[in-house]
Amino acid sequence: MTFARTDEQRMLAETLDATFARGAADWATAIEGNGLDALGIAEEAGGLGTSLRDAAVVAAALGRTNAALPWAEHWVAKRYGARPAGDDASADALAVLHCAEIVGLCRTMLRDTALFSHERRQFGVAIGSFQALRHRMADMAMMIEQAEAITGAAIDALESLATDAPRAVSAARVTCDDAARIVGEGAVQIHGAMGLTAELRLAGYFRRACALRQGDGGARAHLARYAA
């Protein structure tokens, strides 16, 4: 399961996937119904803890189903409270959770594309047998693995209060921006004209990924921060 390291985190991801499989992607059912609104609150204050990785597990699950819920913003507000505009700690946590959601979105876009490539036939064979498309999907899969790995590194850096945490977050944000573009555009193009129609859920995933790319100051600002 994406970002899950412990048995509890894997169980959390599985529970959310099962909830979404039943078609329940609203806030009351997915978040409140699973008690997740207590994440971001310290255990001594009656919450479930302030682990950023726990929050990322939830964000990735939301991405896999494209629930488009304001989970990242909710968790950051719970964890950090009211902070002045420009506060780096809360902004970096928000960016990382958006990265986790992008990874989840990309995983479903690739899965749907792989399934489509086995169903769609041209010249009497499945298009998934075409070497060019197989290589394209392999590149998409590699981009997702890279995005997940570097986002995981950013989570570790933030949680350990590492001095290079801001650079790790910016590296993750730029990489996930690339992943959203490469995987999203690849998925749409392999689906052909159907890729952006309302008949397929892919269009909604692609739009959500594009929307997330525009946030957190944008990839260009993070690239500049990384290079500074």
Image: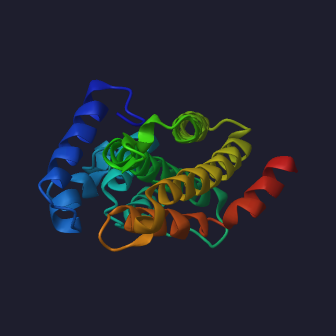
- Relative vertical location of residue 189 with respect to residue 126 in this rendering, above or below: below
For the point 59% across and 34% down, the residue is: 153
Visible in this render: residue 81? no
- Relative vertical location of residue 157 with respect to residue 76 in this rendering, above or below: above
For the point 59% across and 68% down, the residue is: 215
Question: Which part of the image, by quadrant, shows the N terminus?
Answer: top left
18 with respect to 3 (left or right): left
Count of labels in the image: 0
Q: Residue furthest right?
A: 228
197 with respect to 176 (left or right): left
Question: In the rendering, at what x and y percent does residue 188 appear?
Answer: 49, 60
Question: In the rendering, at what x and y percent does residue 90 appear?
Answer: 56, 58
Question: In the rendering, at what x and y percent does residue 196 appear?
Answer: 43, 70
- Relative vertical location of residue 29 with respect to residue 190 in this rendering, above or below: below
Check the image and tell me how it is coloured: rainbow
Q: For residue 50, what is the image quadrant?
A: top left
Q: Compare residues 213 and 162 and report the one nearer the observer.
A: 213
Question: In the rendering, at what x and y percent does residue 163 appear?
Answer: 73, 38
Visible in this render: residue 189? yes
For the point 57% across and 34% down, the residue is: 142
Q: Compare residues 102 and 109 and report the one nearer the observer.
A: 109
For the point 27% across and 25% down, the residue is: 7
